[in-house]
Amino acid sequence: MKFTLLKLVLTLITLFGVHLSVYAAPDFAHGKKIDQEKCYACHAKKTGFGNGDMIYTRSDRKATDLNKLKSMVARCNTELRLDLFPEDEADVVAFLNKQFYKFK
């Protein structure tokens, strides 16, 4: 009984700890670094002007609210196999929102 209870408590602590790490304060500098290393070149190529930031500032941008921005970052991560962890995605979203989108 003691072993099962201990195992349950340790499992809950582990899960709760991981759960909390997803809600840690975003690291804007880390998000910018990821954007520069993994996003900028592809976006520069897509715009055709060599400026990866233009994809965020164009008038017909697809991310029109914070949830769509999160979805776009997650989609790029999955489809392009960027190997970003959830907290990395959150950092990128926070950076992009602060720098370009300014969603509430």
Image (tube, grey):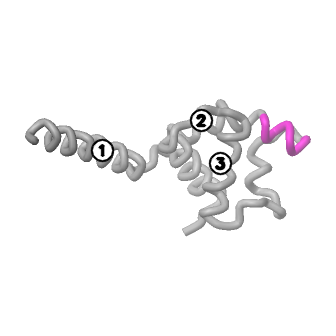
Label 3 neighbourhood size at 10 Å, few (<14), some (14-19), many (20+)? Answer: some
Which of the two discs, 2 and 1, sits closer to the camera?
A: 1
Name the amino acid, label 1: Gly
Q: Is residue 62 above or below residue 24?
A: below
Q: Earlier in the sequence, mark 3 or mark 1?
A: 1
- Horizontal relation, residue 20 to residue 56: left or right: left
Q: Quadrant of residue 101?
A: bottom right
Q: Which residues are magenta?
A: 42-48
Name the amino acid, label 2: Ile
Which residue ends up furthest to the front in the rendered image?
1
Label 1 sits on residue: 17
Element type where label 2 sits in the image? helix
Label 3 sits on residue: 73
- Please check the rendered image and state whether residue 8 is part of the magenta-colored stretch, yes or no: no
Label 1 neighbourhood size at 10 Å, few (<14), some (14-19), many (20+)? Answer: few
Q: CA distance from mark 3 to mark 2?
A: 11 Å
Where residue 66 appears, as percent x and y from the top left, is 60, 63
Label 2 sits on residue: 34
Name the amino acid, label 3: Val
Q: Are marks 3 and 2 in contact (CB under 8 Å)?
A: no
Q: CA distance from mark 2 to mark 1?
A: 24 Å
Which quadrant holds the C terminus? bottom right
Front-most of residues 10 and 94: 10
Q: Quadrant of residue 47?
A: top right
